[in-house]
Amino acid sequence: MPTNVFFNNYDHTQEQLLYEDLVIESIQIYGHDVYYIPRTLNNYDELYTEDTISSYENAYDLEMYVKSVDGFTGDGIFLSKYGLEIRDEVIFTVSKRRFEKQITSIDETRNTPKEGDLIYFPLNKKSFQIKFVDYKPFFYQHGQLQTYDLVCELFEYSGEDFSTGIIDIDEVQTKFDYDVLEDALQMESDGAYMFTENGQYLLMGHIDTSTQDLGSDNIPIQDEQEEDNIFDWSELDPFSEGEY
């Protein structure tokens, strides 16, 4: 049986625009103002498909709807072998037209959201990294796609450069970045930093193993152990019946 000719949801452009306007208005009513922070790749490795020197240089104001209305999802807070970790996840919904107007019109290379970009959420003052972009969260209502769903995870800083000009966003670098000069050795006379033969800073705890014989024996360590009696096996086994 053919579909009803009086209700065609895929050829009426005006109905599609009306539906998209309603979606945008709903996001602006129930959503939140966030900052979309695109990632700049400075040293992309095509073999490992990763970039070790990423930077975040711009931040765009954009409204998004928090789809995870019940709270943060993911693994949450748990104790791993590396210590306490927080792996909160959240899903943001953004209008396709609003993304193009606020971001693509300024930067033509950013035509869609991309994995690796950040979203700064002022509600809890945290940055979330996009792990997956769902380009088809719905199946073509009225023959058009109106939104993207962005699956994000709490961002973990790993040496990226932040220069967006927004203090709340850029302070993650000043808070977590490692300053090599904090562990660099200085001269007592004039306070000048000391360098290795390779021109690198000489850090505290640095050991030059180039002159050591890694294959040497451990006789001196064994002799010292026997003299100090590190292990004492003279006590009886408390679980035995008076025997060793």
Image (cartoon, rainbow, N blue to C red):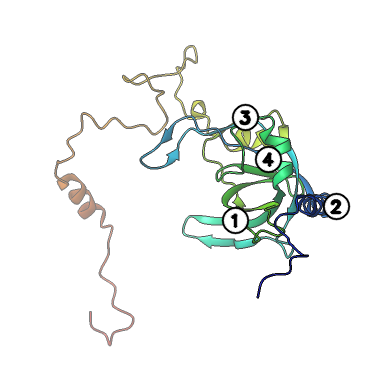
- Residue type (three-letter) at the residue carrying disc 4: Tyr
For residue 161, side relative to residue 2 (left or right): left
Q: Which residue is mark 4?
A: 36
Element marked by disc 4: strand
Work out whether mark 3 precedes mark 2 in sequence or the reverse, and give the earlier one.
2
Q: Is residue 60 visible?
A: no
Residue 79 x %, y %:
54, 61
CA distance for labels 2 and 4: 19 Å
Q: Are marks 3 and 4 in contact (CB under 8 Å)?
A: no
Q: Are marks 3 and 1 in contact (CB under 8 Å)?
A: no
- For residue 29, the mark is 2
Q: Which residue is mark 3?
A: 57
Q: Pointer 4: residues within 10 angstroms few (<14), some, or many (20+)?
A: many
**Mark nearer the viewer, 1 or 4:** 4
Look at the picture and state if 116 lies above or below 200. Answer: below
Element marked by disc 3: loop
CA distance for labels 1 and 2: 30 Å
Q: Is residue 222 visible?
A: yes
Residue 84 x %, y %:
56, 57
Look at the picture and state if 129 lies above or below 243. Answer: above
Q: Which residue is mark 1?
A: 86
Element marked by disc 1: strand
Task: Judge by depth and name the residue closer to the eye, 47 or 8.
Answer: 8
**Residue 109, image quadrant:** top right
For residue 177, side relative to residue 194 (left or right): right
